[in-house]
Image (tube, helix red, strand yellow):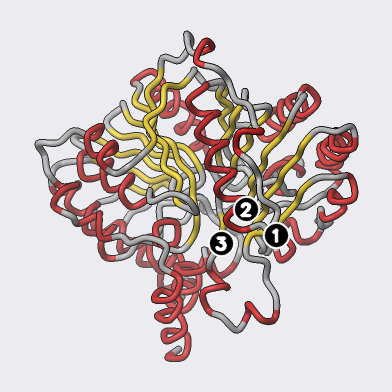
Amino acid sequence: MIIALVVCALLTMTGCISSTKPFVDDFFKDPSLSINEKLEASGSERLMLSQPECYFDAVAFRERYLELIEGAEDYILISTFLGSDCDGLNELYQTIARKAREGLRVYMIMDGTSSYDMTDTRFVMTPIYFLRDSGVHLIEYNPLSFLRAVNPKALIDRDHRKLIVVDGVYTCIGGMNMNYISLGAEGAALQKDSMYIFKSADFSRTLTDQFVNIWNDISVEKLVRSEFDTLSEEDESKNTLVGYLFNQGPGSNQNMSDMFSALINSAKEEIYMLPYLPLLDKNMLAACQSAIDRGVHIKMVIPLDMRGYTRKGTAYFFEKLVSMGVEIWYEKTGKEVSMLHQKLMVVDGRYTMIGSPNFNMRSMRLSYEIALVIDSEEFAKMSLEQGKLRESNMTLMDMEYAIESKKREGSFFSFLTAYYGG
């Protein structure tokens, strides 16, 4: 146990991407400033957005994704945390390969953990390096190797973002990976998640900028931004939503802590979350406790992850959240229901956060993430209604169950593993 603690401390010191100090910073706690002012002051990209196509069903998104690839005429940019092939994704990858052979420019970044996926994908997955034979420009972010394995930072320095740009017209972000449990499975094996497709000049221009920056930061093959056209300002008439984009990664000083801190510290009535793995550090806990003390109702809808270390780790932490006054809805069993992998936060029925980050220390400090905050009561209402549909198999957690869960299967070592490893 002592060795594990030392290793974890070393990982934190060597792997820090940002900090969670904004959660307790006086600027973000200033009641005289609005959420919008705090988001803009944090260096976010303020965007005008179209109403997005919203997908909460992986099969429907996979079909739409295939349509976008078939219709692409110039280029496709893809970034995914986990990428692998399986029977359910074979048509998608074969279409990408065919379009590349026909001359379409396809650039794809996947995290270096893809070949070591520890979800159910590992039982059916096929690595997608074969795409390179078709002309797809495929690179790994921080690939795992023997030399990197001796460097603690390399073990946790991960790119967790999911984004797609098609011809500089369609842009997409969300939580779905390009693997079996995200897009290729059927029935209960398929995760419940979300992806959002926008048609916005602001967004397409910004995501293309950021993808080129990311690519050029990690690849010897350099891209020239001017060679990737995006939507013109003439197509902006349908852009009625205001959004704030946070890209925690190469080429950007934005970070998830600023974004979440602005939302939580400014909340007045309610914070609704689908946080996936809510393993918070002391600064994040302090911000949530401060919100609760102000009278803000915090509700979290949490899945049961069937991976042992995450299940035992969250079981160890439940008591802390419930004792603070967080309302937690949870799954008692995950064997017959699809796991909830969606990331969502809605504040005061107006501000909605979508994207890749979990609400935990790791997404704040140890991985690259991308998220969008949309300022719209209409979009927030839709998100809340959709989120509440996810609660059909959930049960309200009381303190008795939280304590029992911690005693029955909670593990401090598993908590540390999930806290740093996600």
Q: Indicate the amino acid at tag 2.
A: Phe
Q: x and y percent of residue 387 in the render?
A: 46, 33
Q: Are marks 2 and 3 in contact (CB under 8 Å)?
A: yes
Q: Nearer the viewer, residue 255 or 395?
A: 255
Is tag 2's residue or tag 3's residue first in the polypeptide sequence?
2
Helix, strand, or loop for circle 3?
A: strand
Q: Name the residue rendered at 41%, 74% in the picture.
A: 12
Provide the residue designation for mark 3: 158
Mark seen at residue 114: 1
Helix, strand, or loop for circle 2?
A: loop
Q: CA distance from mark 2 to mark 1?
A: 7 Å
Q: Are marks 1 and 3 in contact (CB under 8 Å)?
A: no
Is tag 1's residue or tag 3's residue first in the polypeptide sequence?
1
Q: Nearer the viewer, residue 366 or 328?
A: 366
Q: Indicate the amino acid at tag 3.
A: Arg
Q: Nearer the viewer, residue 387 or 151?
A: 151
Local packing at callout 1 (Cα closer than 10 Å; few below 14, some 14-19, many 20+) is: many
Q: CA distance from mark 1 to mark 3?
A: 11 Å
Helix, strand, or loop for circle 1?
A: helix
Q: x and y percent of residue 55 in the render?
A: 60, 28
Is tag 2's residue or tag 1's residue first in the polypeptide sequence?
2
Provide the residue designation for mark 2: 81
Q: CA distance from mark 2 to mark 3?
A: 8 Å
Q: Indicate the amino acid at tag 1.
A: Ser
Q: x and y percent of residue 80 in the render?
A: 64, 48
Q: Quadrant of residue 45?
A: top left
Local packing at callout 3 (Cα closer than 10 Å; few below 14, some 14-19, many 20+) is: many
Q: Name the residue rendered at 66%, 50% in the picture.
A: 222
Tell whether 299 sits left or right of 221: left
